[in-house]
Amino acid sequence: MVRRTALPLVLRWAVLLVAVACWEVAARARDSVYFPPPLRIARHAHALWFSGNAGHLFLTPAAVDTILPSLGRMVSGFVLAAVAGIVLGIAVGRSPRVYALCNPVLQFARAVPPPALVPVFVVVFDFGTPMQVASIVFSAVWPVLVNSAEGARATDPLRLQVVAVLRLTAPERLWFLILPSALPRIFAGLRLSLSLCLILMVFSELLPGSDNGIGFTLTDAQTRSDLLTVWAALVLLGALGHLLNTGLLAIEKRLVGPTASAGRTA
């Protein structure tokens, strides 16, 4: 059992290490300022963001001004989108008539490219954190809402008949039957929403009026031709996306079970 569990993990890390090694060799062979090797990028990122003292979790003042504001906007937008999407999705999915009426609007809203909505929120909220969070919430809510509605609609009719015979109350039906039945689809929507939140967080910070965050750091480094910082920010975004997705997968396996989670991942 230990070998079956450890072997895939070792293989995944081996593939990553091989890819990084190939990148290192290719970058050093080309010796281009536009294509720095990963070790140089890692040293620059460490000096820029993670060389602080232990009392501040090794975060430098630059990291506090760059990483924490972006994470705050992203987490706020994701939590609001998740709560609104699950509540509205379950409500829509449990009523066939409401679902039939709302489905065209939902499909239209989810098809709108998220960056196209940012100018609308600039007009409504002006530049700043409220506009950034609102754009994240509005764009990330649709995958959760649609998948929650589909999950609620897919509840086994036989089980609904059983809970009707048992005369469970509406909150009991929701908690013990509908939510557990819809959880696999809900987490599928949450994973899509998490990716959108990361994209919209960076995009909103690229706009004029932003003065902190990873997106602002990217723009500022580009204007100063600081290519090492540009690459470090890109690697940081990839690492954050991987860590957040891994954490969400761990929660999903805890609540849903490894078998269902593995099937959806496949």
Image (cartoon, helix red, strand yellow):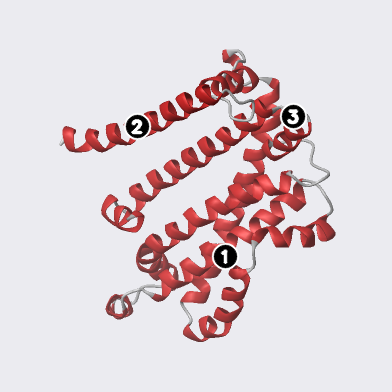
Q: So how many labels did they put on this image?
A: 3
Q: Position of residue 149 (x, y in %)?
A: 48, 71
Q: Position of residue 249 (x, y in %)?
A: 40, 47
Disc nearest the viewer among 1 and 2? 2
Mark drawn on residue 142: 1
Q: Residues within 10 Å of mark 1 (few under 14, many from 20)?
A: many
Query: Which residue shows up at 56% across the image and 18% down it?
Result: 43
Above or below, comparing residue 240 to residue 47 in the picture: below
Above or below, comparing residue 46 to residue 169 in the picture: above
Q: CA distance from mark 3 to mark 2?
A: 33 Å
Residues marked 1 and 2 touching at CB (< 8 Å): no
Mark drawn on residue 41: none
Q: Position of residue 37 (x, y in %)?
A: 53, 24
Sequence-wise, which precedes: disc 3 or disc 2? 2
Identify the element where label 1 is drawn: helix
Disc nearest the viewer among 1 and 3? 3
Query: Which residue shows up at 36% across the image and 62% down it?
Result: 180
What residue is shown with label 3?
225
Q: Position of residue 135 (x, y in %)?
A: 70, 56
